[in-house]
Image (tube, helix red, strand yellow):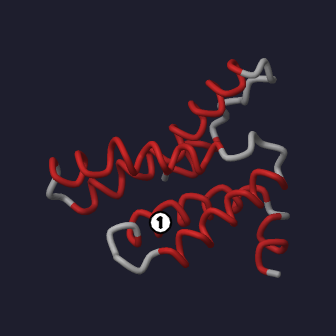
Amino acid sequence: MVYEAVGTVYIWLTPLLGVGFYLWRRYRTQKRYYFPITLFFLYTLYFEIDRDMILFSFILLALLYHYFLAEKIEHTMNCIFCIDLIYVLYAYLGYYLINLFLAFLFNLPFPEFTPLYFIYIV
């Protein structure tokens, strides 16, 4: 399985989440997006279970983005590259912040903010 081969290399696992978030952003505007969205949600659930992260946190982040930010960002900016950059920043920094909030809420250990986040963003 491709995920097992890639998942064992820690530095490549999180960039695949960014790619999944980008593809979800691209498919969410189409009418027949249910299959890619379902694959994205299953992938994130498997990733969170495999890495002992808070379940449904990335899905919660994606839904918050979809209902509160997506339309505003896409209507405000015309630069496609700038929009993609904002999505990547939102995906990684938002994922850290939502895990930090949920860890505080459920009295769990706080996640570490390591320099790897900046590598993933670049």
From the viewer's perspective, is 52 left or right of 12? right
Residue 106 drawn at (x, y percent): 75, 22
Which type of secondary structure does the marked residue at label 1 adopt? helix
| Quadrant (top left, top right, bottom left, bottom right) of the N terminus | bottom right
Depicted 105 relative to depicted 43: above or below: above
Expressed as whole percent of the image width and height from the top left, the position of residue 45 reads: 72, 57
Residue 19 at x, y percent in the picture: 53, 65
Q: Identify the residue shown where x is 41% and y is 80%.
A: 32
Q: On the picture, is 21 further left or further right than 4?
A: left
Task: Judge the density around disc 1: few (<14), some (14-19), many (≥20) Cα neighbours within 10 Å.
Answer: many
Q: In the figure, 86 relative to 40: above or below?
A: above
Q: How many numbered circles does the render carry?
A: 1
Amino acid type, residue under disc 1 in the picture? Trp
Q: Nearer the viewer, residue 11 or 96?
A: 96
Which residue is labeled 1 in the image? 24
18 shown above or below 61 = below
Coordinates of residue 69 in the picture (x, y in percent): 33, 44
Q: Is residue 6 left or right of residue 82?
A: right
At 53% from the left edge and 69% from the top edge, which residue is drawn?
A: 37
Q: Residue at x 60, y 67 (%)?
A: 40
In front: 34, or 82? 34
In the depicted structure, whether residue 32 falls above or below residue 27: below
